Image (cartoon, rainbow, N blue to C red):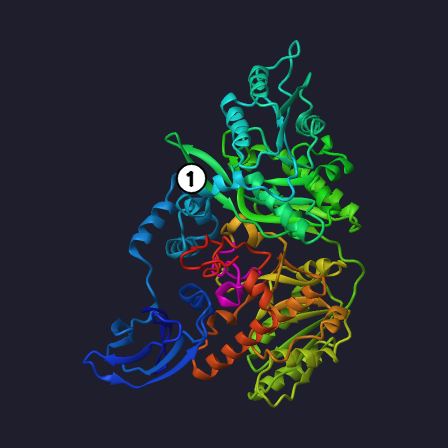
Amino acid sequence: MKYYVDNIKIQNSTMVVLGWAASASPDVPVDIEVCDQKGRVVPIDRTDTGRYDVNQDVFHGESRLKLGFCILIDYQPENTYYMVFKADGKRKKEKLVPGDRQKDKRDRILRIREIFRSDTIGRGIAFLKQYGVKAFFKKLHRKITGNKIDYNGWRKQVIPTEEELELQRKTKLVWEPKFSVIVPLFRTPEKFLREMIESVQKQTYQNWELCMADGSGAEQGRTPLTTLLEEAQKQDPRIKFVTLEKNAGIAGNTNAALKLAEGDYIALLDHDDILPEEALFECALYLNQTKEKGDPAEVIYSDEDKLTYKKNKEFYLDPHFKPDFNLDLLRSMNYISHLFVVKRVLAEQIGGFREEFDGAQDYDFIFRCTEQAKHIGHIPKVLYHWRASEQSTAEDPSKKLYAFEAGAKAIKAHCQRVGIGQVEVLQNEVLGAYRVKYPVKGTPKVSIIIPNKDHIEDLKVCVHSIMEKASYKNVEVVIVENNSTEEETFVCYQEMEKLYQNLKVITWKGKEGFNFSAINNYAISYTTGEYLLFLNNDTEFINADCIEELLGYCQREDVGIVGARLFYDDDTIQHAGVIVGYGGIAGHAFVGFHKGEKTYFLRAFCAQDLSAVTAACMMTKRKIFEKAEGFYEGLAVAFNDIDYCMKVRALGKLVVYNPFAQLYHYESKSRGIEDTPQKVLRFEREVETFRKRWPEILEKGDPYYNLNLTLLNSDFSLRNFEKEPWKE
């Protein structure tokens, strides 16, 4: 028998207990009762709930039982309560203490040690100075209680065993494409060069050639690397190299190596980095799999990590588990990086590498390859080790600031080629990423729809930020009155309509209770804008150009929806995009992170394509809204915005998260959990509705996330495969 009490809280005179319980059999329920300190049984109100995550974890999805529970207890402060679980002939007792369940003390100590590593203390002090003591200790608490897994221990569980590597060596693939591994050399330390060459030679897949161009500076036709290269070539004829008279820069040196290539595909490798043994096999296997379904992929990229040494032992860090192809994230940073594999014919057609982009030559190259490729594949495995050395930008990107300027140039050139035209490319608020500003074309009308039931003070703040703070003025505001009961609400409506000519109040007369989807669908007929902005009544624009930021993206032909970054009133993140599958169905990314706190590979700070965003602030085109038939009214409260995003994606349009459209979202933090039987049952019905409508993404995983990352926390931490098994 297994059980877990997720959350206990006191509301008025009721104790609310949420959790789950499972017996040894997928068909046998767990009996639950509650008693007080004297052993007397206490009456409870129990509602069973579906727990997809627990079902997958414990029974691999085979149980038909509802494994979760919501239990309400008539709370008496003088009593101590215990929950008793009975199943499998066993009886277990759990004391009910209000609050979230405490984490393992040993893990806390380990996390504290991690936080106070010497290389993080400086960043912590800087954060403290900028944001103050309160924000610093919130960040510290979140890190201590967060889901921290040691990567070096974790990777040992997922990398191929020696038996699996040997099986790869013996496997005969139907198609065995040849890979030309392209490496530009420039005064490479001999140790690093040997290790790089050996990593290619150790590949379990053997149909490769290693093509190197040495631009170290030749004297009488030789460089300090020539002898080593000659020895390697003599031992293995698959190794090719050319010695250049002088350094031609990274782009020129790479092009010289590219001229040696005869393979079907080229794979880019830096002169001091390492390929794991299985890298080329995984690429060949993926190409075979895509060829079975049609044409093989023209571009492939993988996940990566960094390699360093501690006491002469290999130490891996900073694993980058990437999404599937994400155009807007690529415009924010070169997230693809390594391992990058492209069809050689395509690489030659686009003209190879361009010297005017030195410093970001690979970024420019990746843009041009992906623009032409019909099929871009992503292998969610670490197939590249980027050496974190003093010579590398892996540890400190500020060592090569010129590379960022070249990167901005690459983004602008890309936008010109794909027909977007002139864009403004700025340094992101965090080093290592870009901010692309798409100019608004014309002044199209934006219709802002705000459902409202009482809460007039919230509504006033929201409307004031639209009318007085926002710099974009061609808007109309439609407030949808929804069963308000307070007299001052209607007085406020009249005052607003007198004050603002572009504001009107309409009344939704639905009889079936609150239905977010129906309310917003009803409002559309009262709007005239080309663009629709759905907005909660408890939001407030932070930046004056918030509407322009949303509109600049939404005007793009390939975009159907744009969402914003939302903060609680304490400047912690409430919404930085939605991950489908998180928490069982869907959830917000990076909830609780402070606005100045670094997130996983800067994802909260970067514009990117996602599967969904929240309708607390969501802009969409009217023509797209109509084509998708609006919000699905079968989802009255939960997941209706996620469902709409899924419908728009099914139309072939992108859903973009833009972190530079920023708002406060005040009330959501205090909304509470689904803590009454009626709310729980409604929520469970909507969970099942969403699951039936979109089974594929829940089964295969969110393409804008990564199967190596957890679905139990919103921080993009590593997935514990023992608790979260993955079915391939």
Q: Residue at x 63, y 30 (%)?
A: 209
Q: Is residue 424 left or right of residue 112?
A: right
Asked if 299 appears above or below 528 in the picture, the reply is: above
Q: Is residue 264 left or right of residue 239?
A: right
Which amino acid is tagged 1?
Asp
Query: Which of 357 and 379 lies nearest the eye of the viewer?
Result: 379
Expressed as whole percent of the image width and height from the top left, the position of residue 136 reads 42, 53
In the rendered structure, does residue 450 fall within the stretch colored magenta?
no
Asked if 304 appears above or below 608 in the picture, the reply is: above
- Return the residue at label 1: 119
Expressed as whole percent of the image width and height from the top left, the position of residue 687 reads 53, 74
Mark 1 neighbour class, 10 Å CA radius: few under 14, some 14 to 19, many 20 or more = few
Asked if 297 appears above or below 571 in the picture, the reply is: above
Point out the stretch of residues depicted in magenta.
573-595
In the rendered structure, does residue 585 fall within the stretch colored magenta?
yes
Q: How many callouts does the rendering have?
A: 1
Q: Quadrant of residue 99?
A: bottom left
